[in-house]
Image (tube, coloured by chain):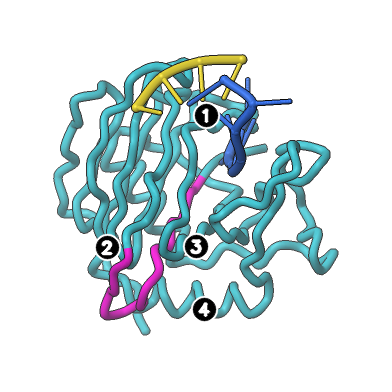
Chain colours: A cyan, B blue, C yellow
Amino acid sequence: MSLDLFGNITPIETALAGVSLLKEFALKNEAILLADLATIVTQAPFRHMVTPSGFAMSVAMTNCGELGWVTDRQGYRYTQLDPLTQASWPAMPASFLTLSRAAAFTAGYADFTPDACLINRYQTGARMGLHQDKNERDFTQPIVSVSLGVPAMFQFGGFKRADKALSFPLYHGDVVVWGGDARLRYHGILPLKANVHPALGKVRINLTFRKAG
DNA sequence: TAGTAGCG
DNA sequence: CCCT
């Protein structure tokens, strides 16, 4: 399987400055992305992590790359080892790295080098409450978010959780890049509606690329 | 405070 | 739906 070129897609600036939507940016390479994802998951399976307050998250997670985002009773952080296996997280595949760098470049970030990819699996009803990505060291680096499978409603809010959020749908292959003034905006995913995608079945997979360390 | 529940 |  060869790695085709990404790009040739114009980012749509959303109503929020610093938030770019790249429609179907990942579509052309979905086969290799899904093959690489399948390999990762055999090494680091999806699991429902627990928040510091003790609740299991409805979204199942795993990671690839040098660092992986985890949560447990101790808090949110990045680790080099998978707490489940004590092994390093699986290496970030070239397909993931190339995709995320191309998306960041297209959105105006020339030198994005992610060291972390959080992989989220949403089954029917799973959600992600409004939150900020703020466990990373350098907020000048953007966030690159890749949607695969069943569509979901993405919420983009302000800088306080109570700020009103804008919602828009994300479909298979869509990529969202945010940074700069928007880097610390609250965002989340509304409960996933029952649906089926031809390639992925009943689930939505989200890849979130970050420079964490 | 990346979460839920409600003697709200 | 809103809040803590």
Residue A63 coordinates in the image, percent (x, y): 62, 59
Name the foreground residue: A67 vs A3.
Answer: A67
Location of mark 2 (residue): A172
Q: CA distance from mark 4 to mark 2?
A: 17 Å
Q: Is residue B2 above or below residue A99?
A: above
CA neighbours of label 1 inside 10 A, class few (<14), some (14 to 19), many (20+) = some
- Assign the C terminus of chain A to one quadrant of the image: top right
Location of mark 4 (residue): A38
Both on one chain, marks 3 and 2? yes
Say which amino acid is labelled 3: Arg
Q: CA distance from mark 3 to mark 2?
A: 13 Å
Q: Residue at x 58, y 26 (%)?
A: A138
Q: Are marks 1 and 2 in contact (CB under 8 Å)?
A: no
Q: CA distance from mark 4 to mark 1?
A: 28 Å
**Tag 2 or tag 3, which sits nearer the N-term?**
3
Location of mark 1 (residue): A132
Name the chain under label 2.
Answer: A
Residue A174 coordinates in the image, percent (x, y): 26, 54
In the visual, does A140 lie left or right of A4? Answer: right
Q: CA distance from mark 3 to mark 1?
A: 19 Å
Q: Is residue A205 magenta?
A: yes
Location of mark 3 (residue): A121
Name the chain under label 4.
Answer: A
CA neighbours of label 3 inside 10 A, class few (<14), some (14 to 19), many (20+) = many
